[in-house]
Image: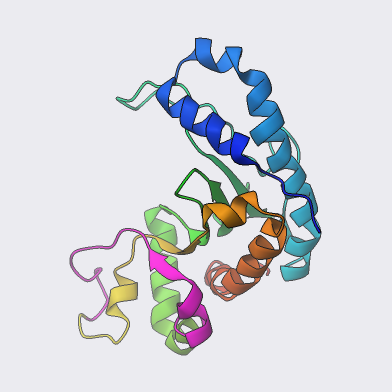
Amino acid sequence: MATPYFSPKTFKFLRALSRNNSREWFHAHKEDYEAHLRQPFLRLITDLAPDVHTISEHYRADPRGVGGSLFRIHRDTRFSNDKTPYKTWSGARFFHARSKQVPAPSFYLHVQPGSCFIGAGLWQPESDTQRRVRQFIFDNPGAWKAAVQSPAFKRRFELVGDSLVRPPRGFPADHELIGDLKRKDFVASANLDDETVLGPNLRKAVATHLAGLAPLVDYLCAALDLEF
């Protein structure tokens, strides 16, 4: 049987951090962060690399400690009223090889007690990227429906994110996909229960979900002229 990546100590650390979100507390418990959250997550990313490559040779699960898939635990508080210094969750992004040059959809894994999930797509894209995706959906409705409206996809994933109140300019209000054309985010996600995240089959579960989300990412890559 596979060895679990995370343990109850992972969630214990994150819950304690949410109650004691200060630099002093974090530095006093940095060994717990490394042992129970950061290093296990980096090991999971390393093990997921061949799974991601199987889905697309253009996507990366990068286990580097800095500049790789794992997000920093530190919050960017420059433009926020909330000045707490640390995130009370941990996340990893499996990204397109050209994502630093052009907008690109990504896969994402989120670890947080009671709120773990896996998702994929474009989150809060710039307006030009939104327009390109909307136009692609308008021009290629059949492929969009095949990607995100198949019974297999809808059983496992939910399209989430913000939408416009009114139809976007230039698109008919009576279009069969007007709900999707109004989207500001093009993202699908599935919840992961805590038992799965702490259990020995986490890598298998994540890899299965990544493969299930691939049709959405493939479609969005086509909309943005990216390889998949």
From what the image shows, is residue 122 above or below residue 34?
A: below
Kindly identify the residue that appears in the image at 78 percent across and 48 percent down.
Answer: 46
Residue 52, horizontal then vertical, whole percent = 73, 62
Note whether residue 75 is visible.
no
Residue 103 lies in quadrant: bottom right
Q: Determine the residue positioned at 20% across, 80% down.
A: 173
Instruction: Check the image and report above or below for 197 versus 211.
Output: above
Whether residue 34 is visible, yes or no, is: yes
Closer to the camera, 48 or 93?
Answer: 48
Q: 151 or 123: nearer the eye?
A: 151
Q: Is residue 149 magenta?
A: yes
Q: Quadrant of residue 204?
A: bottom right
Q: At 37% across and 21% down in the image, what residue appears? A: 83
Highlighted range, magenta? 146-172
Asked if the magenta segment contains residue 159, the reply would be yes
Extreme residue in the top direction: 24
Within the image, what quadrant is residue 21 found in?
Answer: top left
Pick the residue in front: 28 or 163.
28
Residue at the image point whose x is 53% and y is 72% from the top? 216
Whole-percent x, y for residue 54 in the image = 78, 68
Residue 185 appears at what percent x and percent y? Answer: 39, 60
